Image (cartoon, helix red, strand yellow):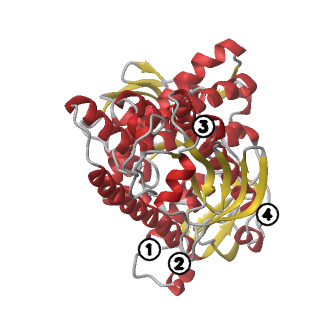
Amino acid sequence: MEEVLIKALQLIVALSLLVVLHEGGHFLFAKLFKVRVKRFYLFFDFPFYPKPQFSILTFKNGKLSFFVRRPELTPEEEEAENNVPDGEFHTEYGIGYVPLGGYVDLIGMIDENKKELAAETHPWEFRTKPAWQRLLIMLGGILMNFLTAFFIYAMVLFAWGESYVKSADMEYGMKFSETAKADGFRDGDIFLKIDDEVLESWTTARLQDLSNAKTATVLRDGKEKVITLPAKMSLLDMIQEQPMYASPLMPHEIDSVFGEPAIKAGLKKGDHITAINGTPVADHNDIQYQLHLLSEGLNERSTAVDSLKRRTVSLVVNGKDTVSTVLTSDFLLGYRNIDLYDLYKDKIYNKEYGFFESFPAGVKLGWGTITSYVDQLKYLFTKKGARSVGGFIGIGKIFPDVWDWYKFWMLTAFLSVALGVMNLLPIPALDGGHAIITIYEMITRRKPSEKFLERVQMIGMWLLIGLMILANGNDILRLFGL
């Protein structure tokens, strides 16, 4: 339970920070172009049922209030509240009760929360501003997300530097899937180059480079070998295939035990699992593969009883002791294997960055993350891609079960990139949808009608609701091992 709370806390802190910064980007450009911002909220206070709207906290004109219920205003009352002299207008800052994001309420903007605007216009309304100003206001949140990622990456490199094992020093080499072996690789191959680029270190992100490459050079039995790669390689298949298309070959040795399945099995530091359900396993990669095969035995028609049966496993430990245990709903044993840095602790390369050196390095790292994320979006519209989409539970699971500031900031930077890229999608109700409409107006010099904007906003909202149901539904199915 403690691990779950730590993961949840990290998720809440990271997303709250990113939401405030994202909405702050819209807010800053709105202020720059003198658009009145009625509300700036972390989390939503929208009325569902029953009305009125409800806020946990509000701050307006120097007054701090808690647990505020705001009655619904008529269009006339709304217009009167907005149409006051400049010195009397104040933005309301608040925290809502629905932790699904945040918003800035720009006066004079048709979005997913407004269905109509007053006939009379005012110079401080969003809709009266030139198209280029409205475009910058809409893109302000995305810009802030990317700048945030660049800054975090830069500060992480400045504070912790960069530590990695050079690919050429990974003497155990790589473990490959059956597909990779058919392409010409062998277990134990050591990557030297992808195309003509010398491989400095190996990360999962390198699979993207491999998927777009023509050749790979490996060290095999002390000799360099050039492997010609297939013309078309699917990055999603390479990542989701078990074992993964290519991953560091990791000898199996338990470093620590933390999960109930491993504790009940009596596993301890230094133990080696040598067979699972009678199938010999030679390394940690093999263990992960066997656990994956067990999870693959379930489908949409499987029941909780089927899941329990699949998760009940027999283990041979240290080549002699046979024990039985039940895996978690995610088909995990609950132990930590020695990692890459344990295995190659005498070959870790440390690179430090000065304060000013860290900024170009942070931008480079951030830009690489952005291009990689954009490249992977194409898989979202495939069956496998849709099934792999995760919601809040899935996002929370990527955080470690102990508070690690390095990992926290690296994951926060990644989520900032993801938030920025997703908001770029040309879906009405997202910033990208607003931007596309504004760019259309700038090109054609024709402003879409308010009725049209209302309709596309509703369509966009239903698309987003559908995506949230898909993502969080996937999470729920995974909780039951389905």
Kindly identify the amino acid type of the residue bearing the numbered disc 3. Ala
Q: Are marks 4 and 1 in contact (CB under 8 Å)?
A: no
The answer to whether mark 3 and mark 2 are in CB contact below 8 A is no
Mark 3 to mark 1: distance in Å? 36 Å
User: What's the residue at 78%, 49% (across, down)?
Assistant: 63
Q: Identify the residue position indicated by label 1 in the image.
A: 297
Type of amino acid at the residue the image marks with label 2: Arg
**Residue 423 location (% of width, % of height):** 44, 44
Q: Secondary structure at mark 3?
A: helix
Real-space Cα distance between discs 2 and 1? 7 Å
Residue 226, quarter of the rendered image: top left
Q: Residue at point 70% right, 37% down?
A: 341
Q: Which residue is mark 2?
A: 310
**Residue at horizontal 47%, vertical 53%?**
243
User: Which tag, 3 or 4, sits closer to the chain's start?
Assistant: 4
Of labels 3 and 2, earlier in sequence is 2
Q: Name the residue carrying label 3.
A: 413
Q: CA distance from mark 4 to mark 2?
A: 27 Å
Closer to the camera: disc 4 or disc 1?
A: 4
Mark 3 closeness class: few <14, some 14–19, many ≥20 residues within 10 Å: many
Question: What element does badge 1 sit on?
Answer: loop
User: What amino acid type should be assigned to the residue bearing mark 1?
Assistant: Gly
Quarter of the picture containing the N terminus is bottom right
Mark closest to the chain's N terminus, 4 or 1: 4
